[in-house]
Amino acid sequence: MINLEHLREQINDVNLDLKNKYNPVFKISSKTFREHLKSEIGNLTKLKKFEGDELIPYNSLVGVDGSNNKSGGAYPHFIEIFQGLAKSTNGNEVFLSSVYTPTLSAVTDDGNLSQKMLASIEIETAIKYIEEYDLKYLMMDGGFIRYKINCLDLFKRLRELCEEKNIILFGVIKDIKTNVISNSLGLDKTIYDREILFNRLNLGEAVLINNEINKKYLENGDGFSSAFMRTSNFPGAIGVDILDTQQEHLEEICNLIYTLTPINSRGVPLWLDIVDKDVKITDEIVDTLLEEFLDRDIYERFFISERDKRTL
C-alpha cells in the first residue's frame, strides 16, 4: 500500500525548499524589478496586434516543428520514427520522415542521438520547404541554441538560405532556460528567467534583450538577438530568437507572435500549435506502421519488449 503520509512529508519538504531558494526572487517588488529590466536587461516595450491590411505581409507564414516516437524495449531493441513538418498559412506544406534503430547502427548511442536526429529533421524540412516554395517568414518551434548544439552544419545552411533569400528566421521558445536576469541580479545561476519573469510582465509586453548581455549574441556574427514576452493572460513568459543579421525585425516579430497568440491560451502562437498537432506521431501510428510493414518475425524478434509480450 502506498505510504501517503511519507509522500506528503517529502512533497512538503520540496515545497519549503523551493520557497527558500526563490525567496530572493519573491521579495523583489514589481517596481524595482521593472526598473532593473529597463536599466540592465533591455528595452521594455508595449506590443501591438496587427489588424486588417497589416496582416497581408504574413499570409504565407511558415511554421516548422518535429515529432518522434519509438517502439520496442531497451537499447538496442527499439525502432524510432522522426517526422518534420513545415506548414504555411497559405496551405503549402512539406513533410520529411526518418527511421532509426540501433540494431542497424555501428554508432554507439551517446544518449543525445534522438535529440540530434529530431533537430536535424526539423532543419531539413525547413530547407526543403525553402527550396520548393516562396516565403518571407519562417517560424521554428524552439530556440536556435538547440540547433547549433545538435546539427550545426545544417543550421548554418538554413541560416545562409534565409539570409540569401531575405527570409526572416525566428524561433519561439516555450520553456525559457536562460539565466540572463538572474546573472544580472546576482542570484543563484540555477534560477532561470522563466521563474523570475512569471507574473512580472504585463499582457502584450516584451523585453528586447541588450546584445551586450545576451550570451546568444556573438560579436563576430553567427549569433542571435533575443527577447522575452508575455502574449496571453497566462502569467508566464515565452522567448524568441532571431538571427543577429535580422535583429532590426525583432520587435516586428514580437508583434507578430503576439498577434498570432489567443489571449486565453498558454501563450504560444496558434499556428505553432496547429503544426505541432499535424506532425505528432502517436503510439497508435507507430504500432500500426510497424505491424503493417515489418515481417512478423522481425517485429517480434527485435521490437517487442517483455512488457509488450504480456499483452500479446
Image: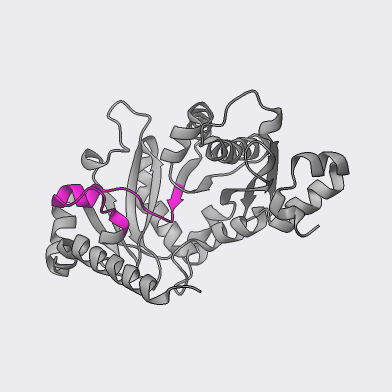
Q: Nearer the viewer, residue 303 or 9?
A: 9
> Which quadrant: the C terminus?
bottom right
| Residue 45, x across and y down, in percent | 27, 59
Q: Judge left or right: residue 79 versus residue 197.
A: right
| Residue 67, x across and y down, in percent | 61, 49
Asked which colour scheme the image uses, the reply is: one colour
* Residue at left offset 67%, top offset 27%: 105
Vertical placement of residue 127 versus 15, above or below: above
| Residue 243, x across and y down, in percent | 40, 38
Residue 26's quadrant in the figure?
A: bottom left
Asked if residue 220 shows in the view, the reply is yes
| Residue 139, x across and y down, in percent | 51, 48
Q: Nearer the viewer, residue 106 or 118?
A: 106
Q: Nearer the viewer, residue 42 or 302?
A: 302
- As for residue 49 lying within the magenta part, the answer is no
Residue 297's quadrant in the figure?
A: top right
Q: Judge left or right: residue 32 versus residue 194.
A: left
Vertical placement of residue 49 versus 283, above or below: below
* Residue at left offset 66%, top offset 40%: 133
Asked if residue 295 shows in the view, the reply is no
Give the magenta range: 171-194
Vertical placement of residue 170 versus 130, above or below: below
Q: Judge left or right: residue 7 versus residue 137.
A: left
